[in-house]
Image: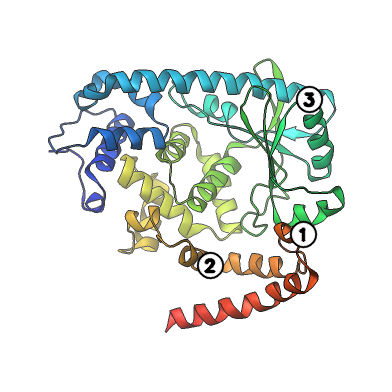
Amino acid sequence: MLSNENKHLTNFTPEFRLLCAILSCITNQKKMIWDLPVDYTVLKKLIATHNLSSLLYSKIQDFEVLHAIEDFLNRSSKKSLINHLKLKADFLKLWDILQQHNFKISVYKGHYLIDAIYNEKNIRTSTDIDILIEEKDLWKIKNLLLSLGYTLVYPEYDLPEHKAPLFKKIENEIAFYTPNGCAVDLHFKLFKNPYILKTKQWETFVTVYEGRKMEVLPLPEIFVYLIVHGKKHDWNRLKWLMDIVQFYNIFKEEHWNLVDEIIKENDLEYMFYETLQLCEVLLGAKIPIRYQQNVLTVLADNFNPHKVLFPAKNKFFKNLQVLKEKKSWKYFWHQILQFPARDLYWINITFLPRLLHPIARPFIFLFIIRKSNK
């Protein structure tokens, strides 16, 4: 049987439980015995989805259960690593281009962060390039990259420059493919929702990475950002939780104190404690001592990892759940105030439908939410 099996994992598939057990043993440097049947086709899909092939292949000698898919792990880890190195080369090239044109840019995840928080190299790979830019430089950078052979991926519709102010209000990034085919996301805001994190006071600092001076966000700010980002996407990548756990090993008291300030300022206590509990249940990462009692008090018996990872199958009702959260209501009304052109996909639609839709929308949602609460 599985040595670290617990009641929280019973609703998950055997393959997902096996993956969590392996990650837990890696986290705690323990051995594992597994005797439940496993569908290796499902397991391979899970490993690919969560981008864990490089990590698992590096530890394959410690887990006999993985020997049956050694060839798969070998091939997929090589492919993942090659893509990771290709991304890194394009990231450094793009950084140099933007620096040469005197744009103010910074990093907050990706290759820099992986190298900063992981002791072992090449066990965590990236799938895209993320750079933080200034909102005022958005269109200049867009035109520059298009002139250099980059392909605009998002927005995928024609967006004239006079629509830029509206776009900046309701979006947070533009996306490209480099000439080598690597995905690039240029963020001018961390999130579309301006009320999730108060980032105006966040200051970058300069560090040297790959022979270049780079402005980066401090690790406590990155840590909180990763928690909000993971929650926003229902933690649908276990590698994101593995990233969170890495901070446990490098944070000192002053780092945790800054985290506490950010969490309190943004009213994210429940989300924070839920993430710590999730890391313990799925990855066996012990909750830092300073938070153990708070996690027990705040979450009590309400914690259900299956609901955290799969909150609602229906996208419509999932959006309702998000709307009912305090900060999302602010963003909801913020969106409504952008009418009559709130949705840029409607640029070519006549004025009346564009006007009526956002006016009617809040009343429709209020009716549905009140009905769901009865």
Which residue is labeled 1 in the image? 347
Q: Which amino acid does the dot numbered 1 rest on?
A: Ile
Which quadrant of the rendered structure holds the C terminus?
bottom left
Quadrant in the rendering for residue 181? top right
Classed neighbour count for the residue bearing mark 1: other residues with Cα under 10 Å, few (<14), some (14–19), many (≥20): some
User: Gap between marks 2 and 1, in whole Å?
Assistant: 30 Å
Q: CA distance from mark 2 to mark 3?
A: 43 Å
- Measure the alpha-carbon separation of dots 3 and 1: 28 Å
Q: Which residue is at 78% across, 41% downward? A: 134
**Which label is found at residue 130?**
none
Q: Quadrant of the N terminus?
A: top left
Task: Identify whether 175 is placed above or below 179.
Answer: below
| Local secondary structure at mark 2 | loop
Q: Which residue is mark 2?
A: 325
- Mark 2 vs mark 1: which is more N-terminal? 2
Q: Amino acid at mark 2?
A: Glu
Do callouts 3 and 1 mark residues in contact (Cβ within 8 Å)? no
Confirm whether residue 213 shows in the render.
Answer: no
x, y (%) of residue 2? 17, 38
Q: Are marks 2 and 1 in contact (CB under 8 Å)?
A: no
Looking at this view, name the residue that lies furthest to the right: 162
Q: Earlier in the sequence, mark 2 or mark 3?
A: 3
- Residue at image position (77%, 30%) is 145
User: Which label's residue is closer to the chain start, 3 or 1?
Assistant: 3
Disc 3 residue crowd, few under 14, some 14–19, many 20+, Cα 10 Å: few
Kind of residue indicated by mark 3: Leu
Q: Position of residue 318 (x, y in %)?
A: 47, 63
Residue for badge 3: 148
Q: In this rendering, would 317 be left or right of 152?
A: left
Q: Nearer the viewer, residue 34 or 247?
A: 34
Q: From the top left corner, tell me how far across and down residue 151 is, in percent.
A: 71, 32
